[in-house]
Image (spheres, rainbow, N blue to C red):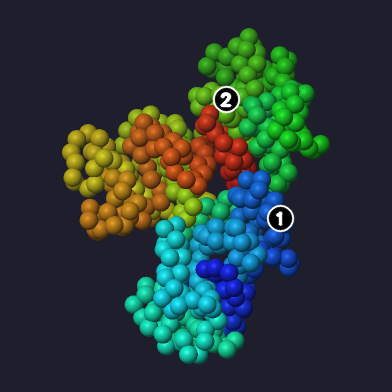
Amino acid sequence: MRKVYVIAPTGINAETAKTAHSFYDYIVKQEPKTVYFKPIGESHGSISQERVRVLLSSGNSSVLMEQLLALFMEVASDQEVIVVEGVSANEFPFRSKKLNEIIAQALDASVILVSSATGKTPLAVCSEVEIEAQDYFEIKVRVACSVITGVEESAKESLSQAFKNSFVNVLAYEINNEMKIDESLVKKIIELKTEHHITQPEFRANLIRQAGLNLKRIVLPEGTEPRTVKAAILAYERKIALPVLLGNRTEIEYIAEKHGLDVPAGLEIIEVNETTGERFVNTLVELRKEKGMTEELARDLLKDSVWIGTMMLKMGEVDGLVSGAVHSTADTVRPALQVIKTAPGVKSISSVFFICLPSQILVYGDCAINQNPDSSELASIAIQCHDTAKAFHLPAKVAMLSYSTGTSGKGDDVDLVVEATRLVKSVRPDIVIDGPLQYDSATAESVAKIKAPHSPVAGKANVLVFPNLNAGNITYKAVQRSAANVICIGPMLQGLAKPVNDLSRGAFVDDIIYTIALTAIQAQSID
């Protein structure tokens, strides 16, 4: 399993680069498939300091992390150990610590802290290291060990005593410009098995990279909605997709200018007026004639931009559709169900949200479509959610959620989840699933050890299936609005013959951009 180590300073004059190179030189002798990575700097393969400042000052830290991950993936391919030179306080005196925290989180890395002993007492050095380590622990970043630089020969013993009972082991002391490395500790660190979690920046970077491999035309019917306009411009400029905006060009250009943006010359805009949908009337009548569709009804429906976009998708003029910033879920989904219809072998559709926490990706379903699924429908939702997680290269441990864990509760609501879980196990024995589980039992190992100690899922679930729309919709919105540094991507619809995705009307610009990327990836899978 790949090991990533970020060499991060605890303060100024900590010799970050020197320590990182020394660690690399030592490790590469033990493991030849070791590479050195400097994410921020002026050399090739790094993001320049000026670029970092521009992105941070403009509030684009997510773009910074995507670019960092893209560079990391280039150097980390087929490597066993990656030594990452963190940002020194001398380079970014006001942001170095935050940048190193972000880098470590983004790479799911272990941190090796570097502290200078110059002018400090042994106890002060130890306290400095432990305080920094606690800060990393609080954001769920592992601290592997520390390195102490600038050590006087006479102070070595007293420093060793100061760290004797510390929870942070010392990997090396730099004495007279020479690293004295504890070889046994290096061996333990390298051999320590850790479970890799796909982080929020890694997942987002993967989405952007995958979408950009084969650009798809994604129609955005709400073409004059400000968030949609901004998202379309950014998605086009970042080569995520080829957005197609439906709306008045003059109005779109005015909205863009108001937000400090220019509409790129290559961004497609289709003017929408009363006659725009006329060319789809006959086709819509033919598709829905058994349901009583007439030319008059078709013309009336095709005054709506979502219906126009859906017909463009049906006719193969675009590859996917994203709507919902203004329209309701019903208004976005109903046209798709009527003319796009479900994929072969699929009885009903459902939805998922990708809940991107800083250090983990969760899959929530169903939070947008099915109000009160029966046990069979709930089982189908669970299977679709599992398969979606796998399709996006996520692990898939499925928790069927309830107010009850195991047999602690009784009643119809619990029986529904019990039966749905049984059905999934019977038709898809390959799926790792358990239920009923309460949310904390499903996601928190400390709770799982008490409430469900023998569960294969409890405490480790990343696919969370809610028993009804009430529970799912409330939970995802609570997380989206209340938790820090969380991005909710979706809802992504599952089961349609062609990709149509609904937005929350409270969606942020980033949410729309990533939903465009998801839709493009779904379209690629249909090719």
- CA gap between label 1 and label 2 equals 35 Å
- Report the front residue among 297 and 351: 351
Report the residue that reaches farthest toward the right: 265
Q: Residue at x 65, y 16 (%)?
A: 303
The disc placed on residue 366 is none
State which quarter of the image contains the C terminus. top right
- Can residue 96 be seen here? yes
Q: Residue at x 52, y 52 (%)?
A: 200
- What is the number of callouts on the image? 2
Q: Secondary structure at mark 2?
A: loop
First in sequence: mark 1 vs mark 2 = 1
Location of mark 1 (residue): 51
Instruction: Identify which amino acid the numbered label 1 is placed on.
Output: Arg
Q: How far across and how far down the image is residue 297, in percent?
A: 60, 11
- Can residue 28 be seen here? no
Q: How far across and how far down the image is residue 254, in percent?
A: 75, 26
Q: How far across and how far down the image is residue 326, in percent?
A: 57, 25
Residue 222 figure quarter: top right
Residue 429 horizontal side relative to residue 97, left or right = left
Q: Nearer the viewer, mark 1 or mark 2?
A: 1
Instruction: Identify which amino acid the numbered label 2 is placed on.
Output: Val
Please tell me how crowded label 1 is: few (under 14), some (14-19), or many (20+) other residues with Cα within 10 Å.
Answer: few
Residue 471 figure quarter: top left
Please tell me how crowded label 2 is: few (under 14), some (14-19), or many (20+) other residues with Cα within 10 Å.
Answer: some
Location of mark 2 (residue): 326
Q: Secondary structure at mark 1?
A: helix
Residue 215 horizontal side relative to residue 180, left or right = right
